[in-house]
Amino acid sequence: VQLQASGGGLVQPGGSLRLSCAASGTIFARAAAGWYRQAPGKQRELVAGITPGLNTHYADSLKGRATISRDKAKNTVFLQMDNLKPEDTALYFCNVGQSTVAIMGGRAADFDYWGQGTLVTVSS
């Protein structure tokens, strides 16, 4: 399984971006998926997650400004982020499998796939 992340870019404060994580198979139906970010000098953190049953979780830092969703037909998970702030600047990664299951709960997964990062820069 391969995960292809895209959608990052440079945006002004207050702007919006939609990140996409496309999978090569129907992996999102098997385990929780999540978007993580890592800023320079900081640890990677889960910012949004979604289970196969479409339960969602958001970090406090993005709550009210982000929406995670899944397109079953396209095997893709999206992260819509609005009202972006400079502190949202980071490398964003998508994951499906045990890393996110461990945080969100559910049946343990025997796989753990990561996409490559997509850079989000919020600056005027």
Image: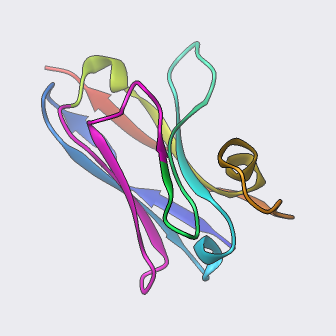
Name the image quarter holding residue 68: bottom left
Residue at 60% x, 82% y is 26
Residue 80 located left or right of residue 119: left
- Colour scheme of this structure image? rainbow
Q: Residue furthest top?
A: 41
Does the rendering let one see residue 116? no
Q: Is residue 58 magenta?
A: yes
Above or below, comparing residue 99 to residue 62 in the picture: below
Above or below, comparing residue 110 to residue 40 in the picture: below
Q: Residue furthest bottom?
A: 73
Residue 42 located left or right of residue 22: right
Q: Is residue 53 magenta?
A: no
Q: How many marks?
A: 0
Q: 58 or 24: which is nearer to us?
A: 58
Question: Where are the magenta residues, as a range?
Answer: 57-83
Above or below, comparing residue 36 to residue 18 in the picture: above
Percent of width and height locating residue 62: 36, 32
Does the rendering let one see residue 49? yes
Residue at 34% x, 18% y is 87
Residue 56 located left or right of residue 95: left
Percent of width and height locating residue 14: 12, 29
Q: 25 or 118: which is nearer to us?
A: 25
Image quarter in which the C terminus is found: top left
Image quarter in which the N terminus is found: bottom right
Name the image quarter holding residue 52: bottom right
Residue at 59% x, 58% y is 33
Name the image quarter holding residue 60: top left
Percent of width and height locating residue 85: 24, 22
Above or below, comparing residue 55 to residue 64 in the picture: below
Residue at 61% x, 29% y is 44
Q: Residue furthest right?
A: 110
